[in-house]
Image (spheres, helix red, strand yellow):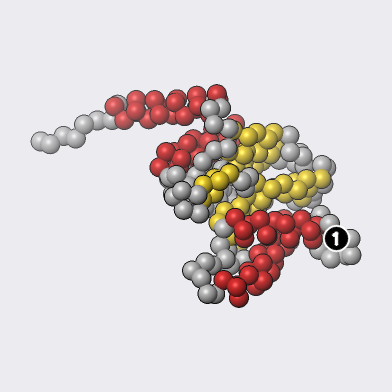
Amino acid sequence: MLLQEGLVMASDSRTNAGVDDFARFCKMTTFERPGDRVIVLLSSGSLAGTQAVVSLLQQRASRNDGTSTLWNAQTLFDVAMLVSDAMRDIEHRDAPFMEGSALKFNASFILGGQIRGEAPRLFRIYAEGNFIEAGEDTPFLQTGEAKYGKPIIDRVITPATTLADATKCVLVSFDSTMRSNLSVGMPIDLIWYERDSLAIRHRRRFLDGDPYFSALSTGWSTGVRHAFRGLPALDWS
């Protein structure tokens, strides 16, 4: 979520390769140089693909040969280009070996953060390597299993939404999704980034049974039921 106050970014940790093959892997990767840049990547799709892309970005970031990396990119748009290039390189490497199976390269990312000298920015990078940027009219982006949690975000989030309210909204969105889709599950990793801070000061992982998340889930369910009961009945006359 791209807000006037900053950014809220979150990801779940469940991966699955079938109804009986679930595992937990963190889908959030951060690159931080306090006072200079904060870069956050959220991933979805094939775990092999997303891990390969992140590992390639990390290896390239350690270069000191004058090439463009995450650490010397001038803008977050340049970073999006670097992520896109890494995705295409991994796909080009793996594609010949996947042609004989039903598998295809499937990795997409949400990229957000801020580099000193420009405002916070937020991108969605598709599996093909092209990308879009969030803005005033579309202040949030999703990837992966998005449809169940999207309605609450559509109703609540505007650029003027506070970071505190956006945090509640994103957690309710995950709660709604997990109730309807087994492919999304705890833990949930969340970052609340304050505009121009150029440092990650608020990061939280919500595990199963987290007291705050449980209270939020219960309160939302109770509130929805109360609102539903208060709706007018259909007049059949």
Residue at horizontal 44 percent and vertical 29 percent from the top: 220
Q: Is residue 186 left or right of residue 6?
A: left
Q: Is residue 143 left or right of residue 234?
A: right
Q: Quick one: 124 or 17, which is closer to the camera?
A: 17
Q: Amino acid at mark 1?
A: Arg
* Residue ID for mark 1: 63
**Is 131 placed above or below 120 here?**
below
Does residue 198 show up? yes
Residue 209 placement (x, y as % from top left):
53, 27
Q: Quick one: 96 or 225, which is closer to the camera?
A: 96
**What number of labels is visible?**
1
Name the quadrant of the C terminus.
top left
Residue farthest toward the front in the current orientation of the protein: 20
Residue at horizontal 24 percent and vertical 30 percent from the top: 232
Residue 112 placement (x, y as % from top left):
66, 50
Residue farthest toward the right in the current orientation of the protein: 65
Residue at horizontal 61 percent and vertical 52 percent from the top: 43
Residue 103 placement (x, y as % from top left):
52, 66
**Is 137 placed above or below 87 here?**
above
Does residue 150 show up? no
Q: Quick one: 7 or 213, which is closer to the camera?
A: 213
Disc 1 secondary structure class = loop
Residue 217 placement (x, y as % from top left):
47, 29
Name the quadrant of the N terminus.
top right
Q: Quick one: 20 or 137, which is closer to the camera?
A: 20
Residue 212 found in image quarter: top right
How many C-alpha atoms fall within 10 Å of the one at disc 1: few (<14), some, or many (≥20)?
Answer: few
Residue at horizontal 62 percent and vertical 39 percent from the top: 189
Q: Is residue 143 left or right of residue 176?
A: right
